[in-house]
Amino acid sequence: MKKQHWAFTSLALTLASGWPFGLLAAECMQYEPAKSHVPGTLESRPDPVDPNGRETLMLLLDEPICVAGGEDTELNKPEQDIKELQVLYKDPYRIKVLVGKKVQIDGWLFHKDSEEQLTNVLIDAKKIKSASY
């Protein structure tokens, strides 16, 4: 009888903790202020919204990612199966030599907050470096 009680209590605690949803959230990346390290291939595409035809940096991810919702779920909505990120970088011309190559981007993820942004999740890149993998 004690074994059954222990099993029921264990199951109840597991469900109360949000499993499997809690487990999935633990595996997902986090929005800012958490820093993210994301590998992929850097691309440059014409910005369809910009009337001047400027280029936009995109990161094609090596593997799809998910991002857990933040405290402000209105702004930081959870997202699943993300395959590309729009990249914001202070000086996109300095890294033009990396376009078409495998890179690692260190920065902060944030959710789309305007229609001009091309992906639901973007990365504010602090550092973009060539990846040797």
Image (cartoon, rainbow, N blue to C red):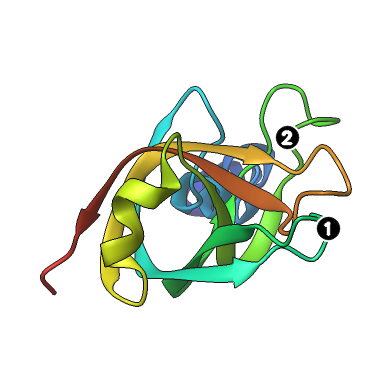
Mark 2 crowdedness (10 Å alpha carbons): few <14, some 14-19, many ≥20: many
| Place of residue 45 in the rendered image (x, y in percent of width and height, measured from the top left) | 60, 71
Query: In which quarter of the view is residue 52 placed?
Result: bottom right
Residue at 65 percent of width and 43 percent of height? 18
Quarter-of-image position of residue 126 = top left
Neighbour tally class for label 1: few under 14, some 14-19, many 20 plus, Cα within 10 Å: few
Report the amino acid beneath label 2. Answer: Asn
Element class at badge 1: loop
Q: Kindly identify the residue that appears in the image at 61 percent across and 44 percent down.
A: 68
Identify the residue under disc 2: 76
In the rendering, at what x and y percent does residue 89 appear? 46, 40
Query: How many numbered dots are placed on residues in this image?
Result: 2
Q: Is residue 50 left or right of residue 106?
A: right
- Residue type highlighted by circle 1: Val
Outermost residue toward the left?
A: 132
Q: Residue at x 44, y 28 (%)?
A: 34
In the image, residue 106 sits, relative to residue 79, either above or below, namely above
Q: Earlier in the sequence, mark 1 or mark 2?
A: 1
Q: Position of residue 110 (x, y in %)?
A: 62, 37
Please, is residue 17 above or below residue 119 in the view? above
What distance separates the C-alpha of mark 1 from that of mark 2? 23 Å
Does residue 50 sit above or below 76 in this rendering?
Answer: below
Residue at 89% from the left image edge and 48% from the top image edge:
115
Q: Nearer the viewer, residue 23 or 77?
A: 77
Q: Which residue is mark 1?
A: 49
User: Considering the numbered disc 2 on the image, is that residue within a helix, a strand or a loop?
Assistant: loop
Residue 39 as seen in the image, left or right of residue 122: left
**54 or 83: nearer the eye?**
54
